[in-house]
């Protein structure tokens, strides 16, 4: 596997086949890389990529050292995902939110242009689904914004280095359980029938003057101030948030209870090393022994290249979309 090195302005400079690379991207990962084993000086700002993959980025810093064994240097930088993450999507002046309509690829291009990244990324002109009046969260990073926007129409972000261009494209989400055979995917799952459904929110004030808000989730996870689950079905918890009051206390409490409800199902899939799996795809696994079907999202990818050997490890752990008994 070769790696391409370009100048800081993106012009292809050299191709190397002797190197080591540790790279990761995704939700909760560093979105960065470490490039080593290159016995020459590379300019800061140089771009690196593995052709026809999403593995690459920009060199932000170098780290030379000298030991009794001699000189060495490694380079560190942001992946393409990290570059996107480092830009913020903001509402236009005088507006509460940024709201856009168009095709998926058209909206990706609009966001790239707004972030002044068109000299780094090219957006595919391929046909893609349409989105109407998509409202972005305020001051959200660009990587998260694009992922959320595409997920709303069952798409995910594809990044690929093609002939020196870093191409962004909207791609339909793949369930790798279907491709690998759901019964061949190793996994562990937890289905919690009763997560916390009553949150006692303690706000500003002391003793009897302290503001208290009770929030409840019903059988379907809907949150209100009306209790519907009692007895063995009732699970309460105290949320101490003394800095909030009024609407801020209510909003913070709803966010907390929503997160507690989302922890209802968890599943961790153990996927084989494979190029092609990416953030936003999903994996469904089945246990015929226990009549269990679990589905989780791929949240990250870790790439390691050393001594000519390459491993690509997808991460698919955390909250499950579904954990059901058939």
Image (cartoon, rainbow, N blue to C red):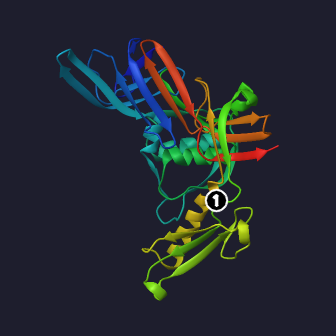
141 relative position to 185: left or right: left
Query: Looking at this view, is 211 or 155 the one in front?
Result: 211
Q: Dot 1 lies on which element?
A: helix
The residue carrying mark 1 is 261
Of all residues, the one furthest to the right in this rendering is: 326
Tell which of 45 and 265 is nearer to you: 265
Residue 229 visible from this viewpoint: no
Any part of residue 279 in sight = yes
Q: Quadrant of the C terminus?
A: top right
Q: Quadrant of residue 204?
A: bottom left
Name the residue rendered at 48%, 88% in the picture: 208
Q: Residues within 10 Å of mark 1 (few under 14, many from 20)?
A: many
Q: Is residue 259 above or below residue 115?
A: below
Question: Which residue appears at 63% of the width and 35% of the height?
Answer: 269
- The quarter of the displayed image where residue 290 is located: top right
Q: Indicate left or right for 39 with 115 as reference.
A: left
Name the foreground residue: 153 vs 284. 284
Q: Is residue 204 above or below residue 135?
A: below
Q: Farthest residue to the bottom: give it.
A: 208
| Residue 165 x, y percent position in the rendering | 49, 26
Horizontal relation, residue 68 to residue 127: left or right: left
Where is residue 31 drawn, in percent x and y? 44, 37
On the image, the x and y values in percent for residue 284 come to 71, 36
* Residue appearing at x 68%, y 38% in the figure: 128
On the image, which quarter does residue 271 sit in? top right
| Count of all numbered marks drawn on residues in the image | 1
| Up-down relation of residue 209 to residue 76 (above or below) | below
x, y percent for residue 219: 74, 64
């Amino acid at each position: 596997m070769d790696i391409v090195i370009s100048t800081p302005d993106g012009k292809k400079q050299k191709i190397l086949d002797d190197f080591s690379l540790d790279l990761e991207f995704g939700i909760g990962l560093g979105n960065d890389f470490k490039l080593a084993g290159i016995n020459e000086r590379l300019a800061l700002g140089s771009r690196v990529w593995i052709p026809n993959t999403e593995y690459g980025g920009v060199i932000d810093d170098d780290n030379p050292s000298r030991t009794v064994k001699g000189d060495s240097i490694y380079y560190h930088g942001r992946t393409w995902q990290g570059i996107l993450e480092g830009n913020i999507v903001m509402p236009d002046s005088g507006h509460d939110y940024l709201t856009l309509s168009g095709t998926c690829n058209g909206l990706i291009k609009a966001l790239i242009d707004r972030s002044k990244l068109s000299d780094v990324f090219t957006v595919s002109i391929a046909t893609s689904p349409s989105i109407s009046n998509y409202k972005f969260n305020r001051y959200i990073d660009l990587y998260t914004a694009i992922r959320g926007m595409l997920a709303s129409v069952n798409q995910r972000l594809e990044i690929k280095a093609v002939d020196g261009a870093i191409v962004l494209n909207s791609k339909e989400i793949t369930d790798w359980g279907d491709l690998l055979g759901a019964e061949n995917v190793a996994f562990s799952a937890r289905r919690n029938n009763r997560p916390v459904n009553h949150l006692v929110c303690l706000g500003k004030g002391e003793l009897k003057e302290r503001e208290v808000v009770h929030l409840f989730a019903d059988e379907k996870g809907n949150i209100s101030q009306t209790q519907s689950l009692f007895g063995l079905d009732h699970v309460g918890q105290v949320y101490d948030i003394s800095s909030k009051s009024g609407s801020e206390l209510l909003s913070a409490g709803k966010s907390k209870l929503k997160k507690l409800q989302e922890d209802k199902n968890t599943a961790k899939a153990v996927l084989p090393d494979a190029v092609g799996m990416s953030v936003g795809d999903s994996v469904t696994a089945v246990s015929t022994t226990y009549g269990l079907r679990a589905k989780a999202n791929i949240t990250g990818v870790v790439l390691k290249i050393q001594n000519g050997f390459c491993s690509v490890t997808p991460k698919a752990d955390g909250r499950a979309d579904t954990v059901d008994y058939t």
